[in-house]
Image (cartoon, helix red, strand yellow):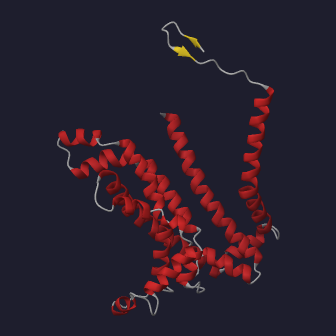
Amino acid sequence: MSTTNQGVPRLKSKPVTAASVWTRRILVGLVLLYVGVLILAPIGALIAGAFEQGLRAILDALKQPDVLSAFWLTIQISLIVVLVQLVFGTLVAWVLVRDRFPGRDLINGLIDMPFAISPVVVGYMLLLLFGRNGVLAPVITALDIQVAFAVPGMILATLFVTLPFMIRELIPMLEAFGIQQEQAAATMGANSWQIFWRITLPALRWGLIYGVTLTFARALGEFGAVLVIGGGVQGRTETATLYIYRALEERQYVGAYSAALVLGLLSLALVIGTDLIRRREAGKT
C-alpha cells in the first residue's frame, strides 16, 4: 500500500498471474455451461422440434382455431392480471414502505408465498373455496357466478402466482426514492395527487415497467394452477400452456412445439426488450 500527496492510502493493484487468468476462465466456462444446460439446450431442442417439418407446418399448426382460441384466452387473462397487479401491487408496495402498522411484517412475508407454494396446490385451494362443495359455494351460487372451471377462477389463480413481482420491484425503489422531494412539493402547495403523478410516478417508472414485464411473462406461462381450477376445457378454459399439454398427449408434436416456441419467444422478447430500452435511455443521460 502506498500513499498519495495528501496522505490518503492508495491500494496497489495485484499483478495478473497465469493462475488468476485461468481461474477466471474456469469460472466463466462454468457459468456458460450452467446457463447452456439449463436454458440454451432446451431452447435449441424446442426450435429443432418446431422446425422438424419446416416453417409451413408451424404456420399451419398456429392457424388452427383451437390454438388461436387458446392464445387469445391467454392474452386476455394476462392483460387483466397485469392491470390488477399494476394498481394493487403499487398500492401494497406504497403502504408497506410508507406506513408502519400491526401485521406489516406478516403481510410482507405472505407476499412471497407464491414462490413457496406449488401452483397445483394453489389451484386446489381455489377449488376448495369456489368448487361445487366449496366454502364459498353458497355465496357464488346466490350471486350466479361461476368461478371454478371458468375464466374467473383462472384469473384468480394467475393473480396469486404473479403477486410478488410488481411489489418486489417497487419496494426497493420507493425506499431509495425517499420522501424529501414529495415533502418539498407539498411545501410548495402541491396536493397528494399532483405529488404522486408528477414526482413519485416518474421516479418509479422503471420499477413499474419491469414489474409489468415480469408479471405478463409469468402470466403467459402459468400452467398448474389454471389447469386445476380451469379444467382445460377445449375452446372454453384452455390457455396456450394447456393446449401444449393436450397436444403433447395427443402426439401433435408440431403444434405443441410451435405454441411453446411462440410463448417462449414472446416472454424472452418482453424481458430483453425492456432491458435494451432501459440501457438506451441510460446511455442518453
Quadrant for residue 110, please give it. bottom left
Q: Position of residue 201 (x, y in %)?
A: 35, 49
| Residue in front for this viewpoint, 204 or 3 | 3
Above or below residue 162? Residue 11 is above
Q: Would you say 261 lies left or right of 152 here? A: right
Q: Position of residue 138 (x, y in %)?
A: 36, 92
Q: Position of residue 284 (x, y in %)?
A: 50, 34
Q: Would you say 217 lies left or right of 97 here? A: right
* Residue at x 57% of width, y 71% of height: 222
* Residue at x 37% of width, y 63% of height: 88
Quadrant for residue 231, please give it. bottom right
Q: Position of residue 240 (x, y in %)?
A: 61, 74
| Residue in front for this viewpoint, 231 or 195 | 231
Q: Would you say 105 lies left or right of 256 here? A: left
Above or below residue 38? Residue 132 is below
Above or below residue 130? Residue 187 is above
**Image quarter (top left, top right, bottom left or bottom right) of the N terminus:** top right
* Residue at x 34% of width, y 56% of height: 96
Q: Would you say 216 lies left or right of 94 here? A: right
Q: Can you name the residue that lies furthest to the top here?
A: 5
- Whether residue 147 is visible, yes or no, is no
Above or below residue 244? Residue 198 is above
- Whether residue 242 is visible, yes or no, is yes
